[in-house]
């Protein structure tokens, strides 16, 4: 019986080990994959390591993560240890009060702490960036250090310090040479916890940073739409670094046992350590300072959608101009608008058509110098220029464009059904529980209004109410899953039959799974266009013009579109990719000139009504 228990225990231990380490092994293997696929290994390559090293944004986020974690750990450990030692000699009432205050952040949800710190910085008008993120990390790391050190202090003889001073030690010597060595295990464990918490943090970092400063967790969050394989490479690098550190920590004591210290070694070791640290610092932080390039030493701040740039365009632009590009990412036009309306400074924005119209109306955009962008506009496909939201392209240059349609599993859904039913296929109970809706009032109401034969820009509240009823019927009878960008990977894995989706995401899905198709209903759809604009408070206007032209010219536009999958505004790139990388993928080339297709127009009143009604639709869905 005991033998069977031992065997069972070993099997369970092996399964648990596999459960924890198999994903890491999978990630490491796919960091050497030759293709973009995250599920199919096509051959060995160092391609993604090269991409990682060339990506200023990715490497900078790694440096910031390590620097913040180390600094926060050192400062929090010192402050936390001193606080714990001080509390041990304090009155009971004060000790209890401080202990309760210390425990509160540990139990408090991260989101509450994050918002509190953000409001604190805003109230005192502290510009968010590296320093604010560091202060936030120090603040939430200190309680963990105190919690780890306090039990060790309590286990000490309270007369230990007095005994040391009776033997001739000064208070400082008693602290450094007697107390601290005794509580060192608690200090080390507190420091390790602090480092881990800081290195891993996302929520607090996200709310307390600014000026383009981001750590690895924020960078990965911006990839929520579509994960770049290069993230496997940088994650593998982190695993190697951590594994190396653990090996050193575990093997160093064994080495010291076999090789006792010799007189004079300490000085040599210190000198070597200083040299190594200096070399690493030079390699990491010193960059090419050449002044030969036209914009050397300047910085371009871009605010763009997450995962909306190609593999090499940023590094190529930096190489050409000598400038540094800092790119912040947003999830929605509304999130972008809040920052711009609150006067946060960016040199370049990439909003959608209706938001460009709003920004123009509110006088937040700079009118473009036509002579500086005319060559870029001449390269654009006709479907993207001189549109209703910006007649004559006075304020914007097209970036990507596309449509909203239906992604479907061709093994389950026939094109004949789609042609017959159009948007109303989302009411076909044959697909009950097998559909995705996109969590966007704009696109969901577009679908419902088009299904009912109305314009998606209607201001008639009766028609909007009918569309609301259509959506309520859909969520009550069809049991859809309401999602955002997770639809991309889910449909690539064929987890449901149909879904509402953007054409660029559908193009990616179809390139990953040949059984997927894309359909634009004959009732009409939204033809959208995202453009590059310069806000009025931009600080580096000349560099913004440089980027607009660079991103619109063939090489930049090709890199963007071939990697992201959205339709390029550059006419030559668009048709070359449609006949090349995306040949046979109809989602890449949006429908053109169809009378029932429309562009969204900005209307604040209608938007508020739809936003409120969409919230009600989601409540109905959650209760169904």
Image (spheres, rainbow, N blue to C red):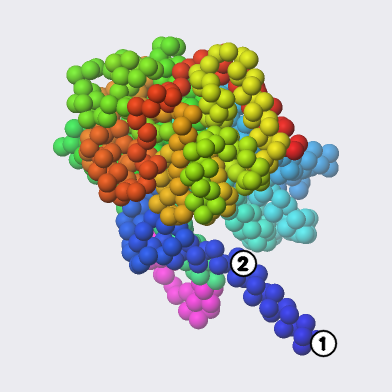
- Which image quadrant: the C terminus? top right
Q: Nearer the viewer, residue 396 or 458?
A: 458
Location of mark 1 (residue): 1
Location of mark 2 (residue): 19
> How far is mark 2 from mark 1, CA to CA?
27 Å
Position of residue 480 relative to residue 609, above or below, is below
Q: Earlier in the sequence, mark 2 or mark 1?
A: 1
Percent of width and height locating residue 509: 45, 49
Q: Is residue 260 magenta?
A: yes
| Residues at circles 2 and 1 in contact by the CB criterion of under 8 Å | no
SS type, badge 1 = loop
Instruction: Say whether residue 343 is left or right of residue 50.
Output: right
Instruction: Say whether residue 239 is left or right of residue 586.
Output: right
Q: Main secondary structure of the magenta part?
A: helix
Percent of width and height locating residue 73: 56, 49
Question: What are the residue bounds of the magenta stretch?
Answer: 251-274
| Residue at position x 51%, y 40% in the image | 418
Outermost residue to the left: 292
């Amino acid at each position: 019986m005991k033998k069977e228990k031992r065997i069972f225990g070993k099997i369970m231990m092996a399964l648990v080990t596999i459960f924890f380490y198999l994903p890491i092994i999978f990630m490491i293997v796919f960091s050497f994959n030759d293709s973009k696929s995250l599920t199919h290994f096509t051959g060995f390559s160092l391609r993604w390591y090269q991409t990682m090293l060339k990506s200023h944004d990715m490497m900078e986020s790694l440096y910031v993560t390590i620097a913040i974690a180390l600094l926060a750990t050192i400062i929090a450990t010192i402050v936390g240890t001193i606080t714990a030692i001080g509390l041990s000699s304090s009155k009971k009432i004060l000790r209890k009060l401080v202990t309760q205050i210390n425990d509160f952040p540990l139990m408090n949800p991260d989101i509450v702490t994050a918002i509190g710190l953000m409001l604190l910085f805003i109230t005192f008008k502290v510009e968010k960036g590296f320093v604010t993120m560091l202060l936030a990390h120090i603040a939430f790391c200190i309680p963990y250090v105190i919690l780890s050190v306090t039990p060790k202090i309590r286990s000490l003889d309270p007369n230990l310090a007095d005994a040391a001073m009776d033997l001739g030690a000064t208070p400082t010597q008693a602290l450094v040479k007697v107390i601290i060595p005794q509580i060192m295990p608690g200090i080390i464990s507190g420091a390790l916890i602090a480092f881990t918490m800081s290195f891993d943090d996302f929520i607090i970092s996200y709310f307390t940073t600014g000026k383009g400063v981001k750590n690895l967790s924020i960078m990965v969050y911006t990839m929520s739409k579509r994960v770049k394989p290069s993230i496997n490479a940088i994650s593998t690098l982190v695993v190697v670094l951590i594994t190396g550190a653990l090996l050193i920590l575990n093997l160093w004591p064994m080495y010291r046992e076999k090789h006792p210290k010799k007189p004079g070694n300490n000085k040599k070791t210190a000198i070597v350590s200083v040299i190594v640290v200096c070399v690493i610092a030079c390699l990491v932080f010193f960059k090419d300072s050449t002044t030969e390039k036209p914009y050397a030493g300047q910085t371009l701040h871009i605010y763009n959608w997450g995962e909306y740039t190609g593999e090499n365009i940023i590094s190529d632009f930096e190489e050409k101009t000598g400038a540094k590009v800092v790119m912040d990412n947003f999830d929605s036009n509304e999130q972008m608008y809040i920052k711009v309306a609150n006067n946060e400074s960016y040199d370049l924005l990439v909003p959608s058509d209706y938001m460009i119209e709003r920004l123009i109306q509110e006088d937040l955009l700079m009118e473009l110098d036509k002579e500086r962008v005319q060559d870029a506009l001449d390269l654009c496909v006709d479907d993207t220029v001189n549109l209703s939201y910006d007649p004559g392209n006075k304020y914007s240059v097209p970036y990507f464009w596309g449509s909203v349609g239906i992604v479907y599993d061709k093994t389950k859904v026939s094109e004949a059904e789609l042609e017959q039913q159009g948007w109303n296929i989302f009411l076909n109970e044959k697909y009950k529980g097998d559909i995705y809706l996109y969590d966007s009032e704009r696109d969901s109401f577009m679908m419902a209004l088009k299904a009912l034969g109305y314009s998606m820009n209607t201001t008639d509240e009766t028609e909007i109410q009918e569309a609301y009823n259509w959506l309520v019927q859909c969520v009550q009878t069809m049991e859809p899953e309401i999602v955002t960008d997770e639809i991309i990977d889910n449909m690539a894995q064929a987890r449901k039959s149909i879904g509402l989706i953007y054409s660029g995401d559908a193009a990616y899905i179809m390139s990953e799974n040949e059984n997927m198709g894309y359909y634009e209903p004959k009732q009409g759809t939204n033809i959208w266009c995202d453009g590059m604009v310069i806000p009025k408070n931009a600080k580096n206007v000349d560099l913004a013009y440089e980027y607009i032209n660079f991103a619109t010219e063939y090489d930049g536009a090709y890199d963007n579109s071939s990697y992201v999958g959205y339709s390029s505004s550059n006419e030559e790139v668009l048709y070359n990719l449609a006949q090349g990388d995306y040949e046979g993928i109809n989602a890449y080339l949006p429908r053109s000139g169809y009378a029932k297709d429309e562009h969204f127009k900005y209307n604040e009143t209608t938007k508020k009504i739809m936003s409120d009604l969409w919230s009600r639709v989601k409540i109905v869905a959650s209760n169904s």
